[in-house]
Amino acid sequence: MSEKEIKSLEEIFEQRIARDEKIEPKDWMPEKYRKTHIRQISQHAHSEIVGMLPEGNWITRAPSLRRKVALLAKVQDEAGHGLYLYSACETLGISRDELYEQLHTGKAKYSSIFNYPTLTWADIGAIGWLVDGAAIINQVPLCNTSYGPYARAMVRVCKEESFHQRQGYEIMLKLAKGTPEQKAMAQDALNRWWWPSLMMFGPTDAESVHTAQSMKWKLKRKTNDELRQQFIDQTIPQAELIGLTVPDPDLKWNEERKSYDFGPIDWDEFWRVVKGHGPCNKQRLSARVNAWNNGEWVRDAAMAYAEKQQDKKTKKAV
Amino acid sequence: MNKENLIQYIYSIADNSLILGQRMSELCGHGPSLETDIACTNMALDLLGQTRSYYQYVATLLGEGKTEDDVAYLRTEREYKNVLLVEQPNTHFGYVIARQFFYDTFHLLLLEKLQFSTDETLAAIAKKGIKEVSYHKRFSSDWIKRLGDGTAESHQKIQEAITDLWAYTGELFDMLPEDQEAVEAGIGVDVTTLKEKYQEQIKNVLDEATLSVPELQWFQRGGKQGIHSEHMGFLLADLQYMQRTYPNMKW
């Protein structure tokens, strides 16, 4: 294809996106669009799978049968999200095994929030309330993103996430209304998860490298800072309602902006965790690598068995 | 039959679901593939759902404001009546599947009889469970075949698990005095009548999977009397941690 031909294909492609048409796997797309989507969708899928670990840490110790069942179902939903996000990613011409390889070798990233430890039962509430809450704000706009398979996967993901968020908030509510020990547990969890949750929206707009392109392709509708502000404005009243306090001495309602002003985020910590030095980066990755390596003989067996069954069928047919 | 014995009889069924559900839930997030991870969690969810129905019933029998959580979390090790089989650890995926297969096969035969119990609550729980456990049995039997007739390594690994865990299957057919009483009252199932069918079904699947049925001189027993293996205490330490550390709180 000549350069001119590509140029005209690109123009048609950008016009389709501008008209809010969905791009489907068999449609022509610029290489950069494909790569960006592989990166983002796989990062999202990996986050779901790694995200199972901190919460999975409390399944066997959940304090009641009702909570145990709800937590199991929640973590299972995340496996399901991973499954359909990997499938969406595969439509861009990369295999699930390749994607796992990228995760296991550290080439692909996942959400840094999962590199923090879950130390008490209240952390399960805080994750549902804050982490899923932040995820929803990040993800709802993706239900209208330009790449069809991703947009459709996100519709399902968002429905379940908002259920998880309510469930997490309900755990916190119960603790906050409980004994002094329970309330202290809830406050401690909020103290530890608040700042990492704010970091989930990514670097400030001035530092964010992908924003402009992502806006054009509808991978983003609002900037990191806008989304972060939306999260804070939405979450503060929820904290107040259950009598918990956000650990930010600078937090103050700004009447003029009709928004909360908040204190400085520790971006050194953010980059430290992204670069692999969070409290659980090593443990999370090795848990995934171990599960994969320990499962190899099982996957091989399933493959060998399927081949044998196929051979039997073919022989019968002959 | 008197209430205390009825409760003991329910424990001998329900505790299996709790302990196996707890074991399966340990795997969540660590399965050999996403698909098996999701399937194992499904089974854990079914088992814990059954557990809740049984324990809610026990709680009403106990009265005095007792709840399903009192029943699940606040007994001592000797008061749990599950068989030794279900508390065995997730040594590797072969053990997970063999344990499941041995229990599912029994479980389905049990529920198919229990659905005709004169105790309406137990009959209803059993009827609902049959659908779930039929699926469990299909899943575990299919995996027995895949692993048995898969690769040389998988064959060796699943045979190892089958041979090790077989020693815990004899106990499934033991009858305690309260079991006998439940049978006479038309409430319980005479598990001795299930044994022949059980062994036949196990043998059929193992044959198809190119695996051999272990020949054993001695079967381990004790769980039904509350005499467990050393694994049980650790399992309960996890299970009961919150309830023991923060007594009398609502979650």
Image: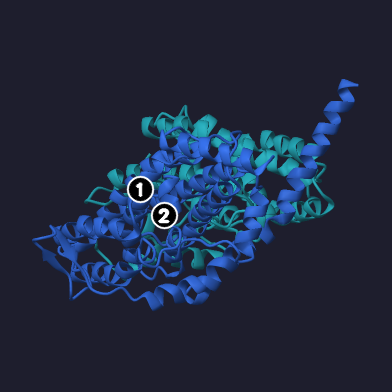
Chain colours: A blue, B cyan
Q: Which residue is mark 1?
A: A221
Residue under the image location 91 percent in, 21 percent down: A318
Between A273 and A70, the residue placed more toward the observer is A273
Few, some or many C-alpha atoms within 10 Å of disc 1 (few <14, some 14-19, many ≥20)? some
Residue A31 picture location, percent across and down: 60, 47
Inspect the image, locate mark 2, and give the three-letter code of the amino acid beneath it.
Ala
Mark 2 vs mark 1: which is more N-terminal?
2
Query: Where, quadrant-wise, is the N terminus of chain A in this rendering?
Result: top right
Residue B82 picture location, percent across and down: 51, 52
Inspect the image, locate mark 1, and give the three-letter code of the amino acid beneath it.
Arg
Few, some or many C-alpha atoms within 10 Å of disc 2 (few <14, some 14-19, many ≥20)? some
B205, above or below B20, in the image: above
Between B183 and A289, the residue placed more toward the observer is A289
> In the visual, does B37 lie left or right of A97?
left
- List the single residue furthest toward the front: A4
Between B199 and A14, the residue placed more toward the observer is A14
Labelled disc at residue A212: 2
Between A273 and B35, the residue placed more toward the observer is A273
> In the visual, does A166 lie left or right of A101?
left
